[in-house]
Structure formats: C-alpha cells, structure tokens
Image: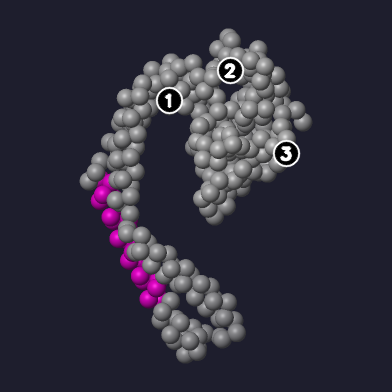
Amino acid sequence: MKPIFGIDITSDKNNETINGSEFITKTISKQKVEELESKQEKLDQTFNDSKLPLWVRIIKYICGIYALLMLIGIIKALPEVGSLDQTFRNAPFLIVSAVACGLIWVCLHFFAKKKEDHVLEEQNADLQMEEIDIDIQEMYDELNIPSDAASVDVLGFAYKVKRGEVCVQARPFETTVFFNFDLKIYATDEYLCLADLENVYSFKLAELKTIQTVNKRISVPSWNKEEEPTKGEFKKYKITVDDMGDVYFKTYHILEGEHDGETFGIYFPCYELDTFESLTGLMASE
C-alpha cells in the first residue's frame, strides 16, 4: 500500500518527496507561496528578536529550577528542624543562594516580558500576523476551497517497504516518527478533497474502499486545534502531552482506496474519524 503524504526512503534515505502528487488537481501560483514564506520568515525573526539571548535564558532556567528545588527541600525539612531560623542556621549558604537565584529569576522574567512587549510592538507583530492571515485566505480562495471546509489533521511519516509491508522509520533529530499536517477537507459529488496552502488533492469517492483502525499508541510533535487536546470534544480520546510538547493518542486510522490498480492509504488520528466517516460514507473497522 502507498501511504499518501508519506515519504518513501526504501531506496533513498535522503528522499524528501511526499507521496500523492498524482492526486493533485489544483496548485497555487509559485509567487504567492514565496510571498507567504517570506512574511512567515520575517515574523519568525520578529519573535526570535523578542527573546532574551540563549545564554541568559539558560541562566534564568537554572536559577528558577535551583530556587524551586531549594524551596521544596526547606518545606520538607521544616517538620524535623522546627523553624525557619534553625533551618537558616543549619544551611545558611543554601538558603542565601536559593533566595539570590529566586531574585535573579524574577528579574530576568520581568526583563524578558518587557523586551518581548517592546520588540513585538516596535516591529508590528500583530500587523504581520494579520497580513499572513489575509494571504492565507487569498490562497484558499485561489484554490477554490469552500469557506465551510473543515480543518483536519493527516499523518505523514518516513517509511521503508519490507517484504511488501510499510514500516514506519524514525528520522534523525525528530522526537516523533509521525508528523501531523493541518489540511482543509471537503467533499464534492465525486471527490474527497484535501488541501494545504499549495495544492488540492482530489480522491474519487468511488475509489475509496474502507477505513481501517490501528490500535497502536503513537505521537505527533504538535497540536493544531484551538481547543486543548485534553479538554472538550477531545477529552474522550484520552490524549496526553509530554514535557516536550509531543501529543500521544492510542489509535489511528487508514482510509484505504485503489487508484490505477494501486492501493493507497490516507493516515489520520483517531480524533478525526467522525469527519472522515461523514464525508466518505464509510465506517471504520473495530
């Protein structure tokens, strides 16, 4: 099976080509894409400029952790020691250093917030974001994306084909093997359509055969929805988020179809199942 939005590294480990080009029916102008990328790079630079230097952020982090650990230690020791005065007499250096680190953290936190507000206002970050939002809407209009098209996460990953089976592969410097594309989805009388900011991918509804369920815990590196993954409509999926921001869920699905004699699959997270079922008319396997 050919995973749409997957990257086949069976014969070329450096391959970056995403599967699915044969389903592209509309493409945005190259000029529009370059203009948007330029504005996004400028906005990214604005946010980078608004941060304290890396070495200062490291100091802030270390001071904050040290002060917090010392505070926890003092609180735990109080029942045995009896008073703060006695605690200070027992370990004056530790307490003084903890207070100093706490004050450093507070000062750096204040300066970080002040610098962020100043730089974002000076470089018109709000205006930059508004311009990007306008450009994105214009690109959707150029691709004729319906205004009521839903946003949906679709899974991509690098893989190798071994004995005819798709084997997901980890790639260097990535904390997860899957990554989640934020796409627009809608259906016409004949097609299920998925669109990013450059292309519309159209899949004939008549060629879509089944939705398979894979009961396997996987993770993605980001969360694309406005509502938090552990609240509201997503709470029932028991999604978790680790300290790195990676998002974990216990099940994913594969929308399978057949095109020109070849089986293909669109992989998507469990929380998108209702959308795919309603637009394709297919029901997922148990």
Q: Is residue 42 left or right of residue 9?
A: left
**In what element is the residue under mark 2?**
strand
Q: Quadrant of residue 271?
A: top right
Look at discs 3 and 2 and give the one toward the viewer.
2
Q: What is the magenta range?
A: 99-121
- Indicate the amino acid at tag 1: Glu
**In what element is the residue under mark 1?**
loop
Look at discs 1 and 3 and give the one toward the viewer.
1
**Is residue 170 visible in this depiction of the protein?**
yes
Principal SS element in the magenta part?
A: helix
The spot of residue 247 in percent (x, y) is: 58, 45
Label of residue 215 in the image: 3
CA separation, marks 1 and 3? Answer: 32 Å
Q: Quadrant of residue 204?
A: top right
The spot of residue 176 in percent (x, y) is: 57, 46
Q: Is residue 186 magenta?
A: no
